[in-house]
Amino acid sequence: MSTAQRFSRLLELVLRQPPPLRVKAWDGSEEGPQDAPVLLLNSPDAVRRLVQAPGELGLARAYVSGDLDVPDRLYDVLRSLSLLSDRGETNGHRIPDQRSSPAKRTIPPRERAELLSLAVGLKAVGRTPPPPPEEVRRLRGLRHSRARDKAAISHHYDVGNEFYELVLGPSMVYSCAYWTRPDDPSYTLDDAQRDKLELVCRKLGLEPGMLVLDVGCGWGSFLVHAASEHGVSGLGITLSVEQADRARARIAATGLSDRIEIRVQDWRDLPDEQFDAIASIGMAEHVGARGYAEYAGALHNLLRPGGRLLNHQIARRPGPVDRKPTFIDRYVFPDGELLPLAMTLGALEEVGLEVRDDESLREHYARTLRCWVANLEANWDQAVALTSLGRAKVWRLYMAASALAFERGQIGVNQVLAVRPGARGESGLAATRSEWVLTR
């Protein structure tokens, strides 16, 4: 057997099906259909990594380190590798992980012996190289303690504001856009992000003079839009120092420093003050299941009676969660946790909030992620120079995999509008949805 044939068989053992790929190995051998997407096998270390961690983690380590590569057709390769396929089943539903794909697979002894035999034939036995430096080794302290949450947030967000601007575009909005004119070729990602921010403002019923809290404010995009277009004042909090610095600079440049304050602050340390409206956009994924009731209670207490909460959050399918290490947890969102929508709604209602509306934006996020991948690939050399080749590969892989996960319905994203009822149960919300959805 050639090197390419052996590796193709190894992939078949790991994935439980022959991968429709063309493998091109370091010794010039090739295997697979001529018209199939290409997987470049650059080093025996790719085999060592896959033997050590069969499944997505081993493959991701090999890709990030350069031991294997995907020159093009990344989405096709991800589908072929079944990184996003429905593997486990519980009552007809896939057992999901936190963001995208199945974790390390347990291989039966007989297949494991063949896998090791293939590794010997590929001259890939011996010490496995260490994980790429982009991988999170270990976060100290209790999960979701203040210090550990800050470290986890820093790992993901403090990789350079210039890098994020290349990926996200001028809007600097790191959550899914709202594509109101998807068939209009002149309609851009920035247009769709503006429409998403406006949608949030309308759902919150923002009016001049209101005080708004943005939990996990990122680079300040929502508060800048809310203040400039709706006349509100606001407070934004983040655990990322780099985000806070850029947000303050953007606010100063727009002349809104007297109306918007940005703090590097944990949501658990907010003072006892009340707001007319609260936006939590892409923040709750970092809270964790155990702390979600506390988070919901804090948001309830920070709202004045009649105030509205807009919670924009990625959701996983119901069912048990595989706790084995995944690419997303090790490389992208350490300690991140997705909850089923029902759990989110229940937590909000348990603390006394009235859930008035839920809107799924799943397809919108898939399209947004594909735009981010396109931005990264179009600015690849600059992105690598701003961070590292490994970091750029991590972002390319995670965003492409997440786009496929949203397209296939393996994960979703929901905007939930809730109200803190007044003394007599009044919500102050219009009775018909058409009165406050996006109309421009």
Image (spheres, rainbow, N blue to C red):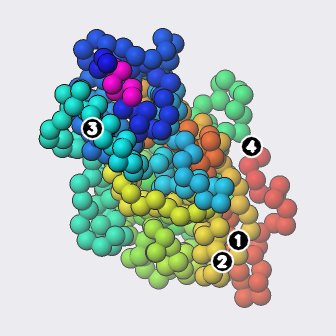
**Mark 3–mark 4 CB contact (< 8 Å):** no
On the picture, is 313 further left or further right than 12?
right
Mark 2 lies on a secondary structure that is helix
Distance Cα–Cα, label 1 vs label 4: 25 Å
**Mark 1–mark 3 CB contact (< 8 Å):** no
Mark 1 lies on a secondary structure that is strand
Q: Nearer the viewer, residue 47 or 99?
A: 47
Identity, as a three-letter code, of the amino acid under mark 4: Arg
Q: What residue span does the magenta drawing correspond to?
A: 4-9
Tell me which residue sits at (18%, 41%) in the image: 128
Identity, as a three-letter code, of the amino acid under mark 1: Val
Identity, as a three-letter code, of the amino acid under mark 2: Glu
The residue indicated by pointer 2 is 349
Q: Earlier in the sequence, mark 2 or mark 3?
A: 3
User: Residue lying furthest bottom in this view?
Assistant: 423
| Image quadrant in which you'd find residue 313 | bottom right
Residue 20 lies, with reference to residue 221, above or below; the image says above
Look at the image and tell me whether residue 161 can be seen.
no
Q: Nearer the viewer, residue 179 or 271?
A: 179
The residue indicated by pointer 4 is 440
On the picture, is 24 further left or further right than 45?
right
Residue 137 marker:
none
Q: Earlier in the sequence, mark 2 or mark 4?
A: 2
Tell me which residue sits at (23%, 54%) in the image: 137
| Mark 2 or 4, closer to the camera | 2
Residue 355 marker:
1
Distance Cα–Cα, label 2 vs label 4: 31 Å
Q: Earlier in the sequence, mark 1 or mark 3?
A: 3
Identity, as a three-letter code, of the amino acid under mark 3: Leu
Distance Cα–Cα, label 3 vs label 4: 61 Å
